[in-house]
Image (cartoon, coloured by chain):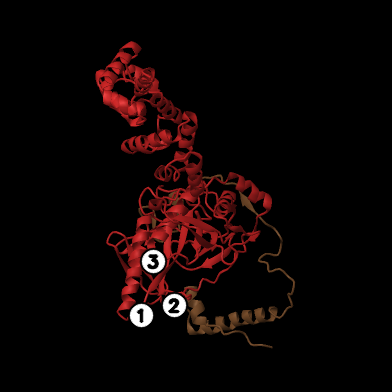
Chain colours: A brown, B red
């Protein structure tokens, strides 16, 4: 049985914007490692001739006509914002 | 050592739909901040996306117009990243199965003179995919403000092959692509409203080299002229670095069109890791022949095809076609006037010169013009029949533009019709003119066609400039022929 691929828990935590304690890192590295290990096992299944699919059911073209409907009033839309000004959400200054 | 530049463009085009890509709240520009949102746009828990059929129609149509292969099946993927303009922390996009593949954009480079057609080239496309736009960030001194009105608007990304070599080619590419999208009714492509945005990938390499050099991505090219200027500036910058023995680094640079300078954007601490994966909430799209056929039937003739037809069918000069074909409404307007008047070039001249000048001065759109194709055709016929002289016709046009009155009525009302109606009087003036210039009579009879013009001046003078030149010409010829 092959071992699970290398898991960089610091990189994963950074991508998820999570600040983990050393204990949490160890715990989640173990858990995610188990998941990857499971995927490794799945990879061994012979899928020759099987079309790759993202969904279990062959359903296509689920859509709606382009008819505009009213949205949320701005007060409601911003109700969860930690801070707001001029009807906009205030966030820390971001410059790419 | 000779270098060449290699340029590829990534163009984002907002699709003109009433509602957003994956939810039915209205899409639009210029609304009060955060008034075009709903739970899906704001990514509230439990919401699910639902595709906009019109956006799919639009991108397939764009693909057909540009000669793309339309994928029989395509799917949606999540592009994961944290940025405050994206409430979900991922963008729904198409990663490995875009809806349109390949295709081309026909471009025309500047000709040797304004009235001469330039070289045409075909720029290959890599792909076109559909995704959703993000919100707009307004940067302040100490914080940033987010408006989510734009978030979730259907957005096409049109990716060219790295197949252009000059800033002029990139400019021509964008001009042609933009016109194609507007023609197809796919987008209004107003760059000021962010409906068309362009990033350029630029590298240089030795002539003859086939590998691409180190790529610089140029961002913030927010007008077509800035694209040309920005690319031109970047090519020069890269050449200068290499020539002084420096090394180019892969980076993203921000171009400032106002100052004509660029600066490197803060390099990222690590490469982007978007962790694309298929969106479990969205089923794939299947496009069959019937769907494509239906959209193909709606595809308009493209500007360059129209131009070739105008040159051939109406025998228009190139300069006139290059004014008329780039605006579909204007081209249609012209064709109607050309058919009604039977004089395409005259109709084209009135439209390209007088009508566009008056529209520009009045800040009116063509659709609001009181002068309709039938007016133009009627004026062309008035001039052609000799009933109205050119200068009077110009006056009639201005009046017609202001009032929408028929040209014939204006000519009558303002006394602008060519005179006299007294045939006997005109004939006498013609006789006098012939009698006064024996030399011209001899020349004309010897076959010098232009000699007849020598009589016209005195006749017109006698008529105080109001005679009908066509009638003068006919009368002179009749009298000269009668002399034997």
Dot 1 and dot 2 within a common chain = yes
Instruction: Mark 1 or mark 2: name the one nearer the start of the chain.
Output: 1
Image disc number at residue B270:
2
Image disc number at residue B218:
3
Badge 2: chain ID = B
Compared with B215, B363 (above or below) is above
Query: For the residues carrying marks 1 and 2, which lies nearer the camera in this image?
Result: 1
Q: Secondary structure at mark 2?
A: loop
At a point 48% along the width and 42% down the height, the residue shown is: B310
Is residue B438 left or right of B322 when viewed as pictured?
Answer: left
Query: For the residues carrying marks 1 and 3, which lies nearer the camera in this image?
Result: 1
> Is any atom of residue B138 visible in this view?
no
Badge 3: chain ID = B
Compared with B252, B450 (above or below) is above
Classed neighbour count for the residue bearing mark 2: other residues with Cα under 10 Å, few (<14), some (14–19), many (≥20): few
Instruction: Mark 1 or mark 3: name the one nearer the start of the chain.
Output: 3
Instruction: Mark 2 or mark 3: name the one nearer the start of the chain.
Output: 3
* Location of mark 1 (residue): B247
């Amino acid at each position: 049985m092959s071992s699970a691929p290398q898991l960089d828990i610091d990189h994963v935590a950074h991508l998820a914007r999570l600040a983990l304690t050393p204990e949490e890192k160890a715990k989640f590295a173990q858990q995610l490692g188990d998941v990857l290990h499971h995927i490794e096992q799945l990879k061994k299944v012979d899928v020759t001739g099987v079309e790759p699919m993202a969904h279990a059911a062959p359903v296509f073209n689920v859509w709606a006509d382009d008819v505009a409907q009213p949205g949320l009033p701005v007060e409601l839309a911003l109700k969860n914002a930690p801070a707001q000004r001029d009807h906009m959400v205030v966030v820390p200054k971001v410059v790419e | 050592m000779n270098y060449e530049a290699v340029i590829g463009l990534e163009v984002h085009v907002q699709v003109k739909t009433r509602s957003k890509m994956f939810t039915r709240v209205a899409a639009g520009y210029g609304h009060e901040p955060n008034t075009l949102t709903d739970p899906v746009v704001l990514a509230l828990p439990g919401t699910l996306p639902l595709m906009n059929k019109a956006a799919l129609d639009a991108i397939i149509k764009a693909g057909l117009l540009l000669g793309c292969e339309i994928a029989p099946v395509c799917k949606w993927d999540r592009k994961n990243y944290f940025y405050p303009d994206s409430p979900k922390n991922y963008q729904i996009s198409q990663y490995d199965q875009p809806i349109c593949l390949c295709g081309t954009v026909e471009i025309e480079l500047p000709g040797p003179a304004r009235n001469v057609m330039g070289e045409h080239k075909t720029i290959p496309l890599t792909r076109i995919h559909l995704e959703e736009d993000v919100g707009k960030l307004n940067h302040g001194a100490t914080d940033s403000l987010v408006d989510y009105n734009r978030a979730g608007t259907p957005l096409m990304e049109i990716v060219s092959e790295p197949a252009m070599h000059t800033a002029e080619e990139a400019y021509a590419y964008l001009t042609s692509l933009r016109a194609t999208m507007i023609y197809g009714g796919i987008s209004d492509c107003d760059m000021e409203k962010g409906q068309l945005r362009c990033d350029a990938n630029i590298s240089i390499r030795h002539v003859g080299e086939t590998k691409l050099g180190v790529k610089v991505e140029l961002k913030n090219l927010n007008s077509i002229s800035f694209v040309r200027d920005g690319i031109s500036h970047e090519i020069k910058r890269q050449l200068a670095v290499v020539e002084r023995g420096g090394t180019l680094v892969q980076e993203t640079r921000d171009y400032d069109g106002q100052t004509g300078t660029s600066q490197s954007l803060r390099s990222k601490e690590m490469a982007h890791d978007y962790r694309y994966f298929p969106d479990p909430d969205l089923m794939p799209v299947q496009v069959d022949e019937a769907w494509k056929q239906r959209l193909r039937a709606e595809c308009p003739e493209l500007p360059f095809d129209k131009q070739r037809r105008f040159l051939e069918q109406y025998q228009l000069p190139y300069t006139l076609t290059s004014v008329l074909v780039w605006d579909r409404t204007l081209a249609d307007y012209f064709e109607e006037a050309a058919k009604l008047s039977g004089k395409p070039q005259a109709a084209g001249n009135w439209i390209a010169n007088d009508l566009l000048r008056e529209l520009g001065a009045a800040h009116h759109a063509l659709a609001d013009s009181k002068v309709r194709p039938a007016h133009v055709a009627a004026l062309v016929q008035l001039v052609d029949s000799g009933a109205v002289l050119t200068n009077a016709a110009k006056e009639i046009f201005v009046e017609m533009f202001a009032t929408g009155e028929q040209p014939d009525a204006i000519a009558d009302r303002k006394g602008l019709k060519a005179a006299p109606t007294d045939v006997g009087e005109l004939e006498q003036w013609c006789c006098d003119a012939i009698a006064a210039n024996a030399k011209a009579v001899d020349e004309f009879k010897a076959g010098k066609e232009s000699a007849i013009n020598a009589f016209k001046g005195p006749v017109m003078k006698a008529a105080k400039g109001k005679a009908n030149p066509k009638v003068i010409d006919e009368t002179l010829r009749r009298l000269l022929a009668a002399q034997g």
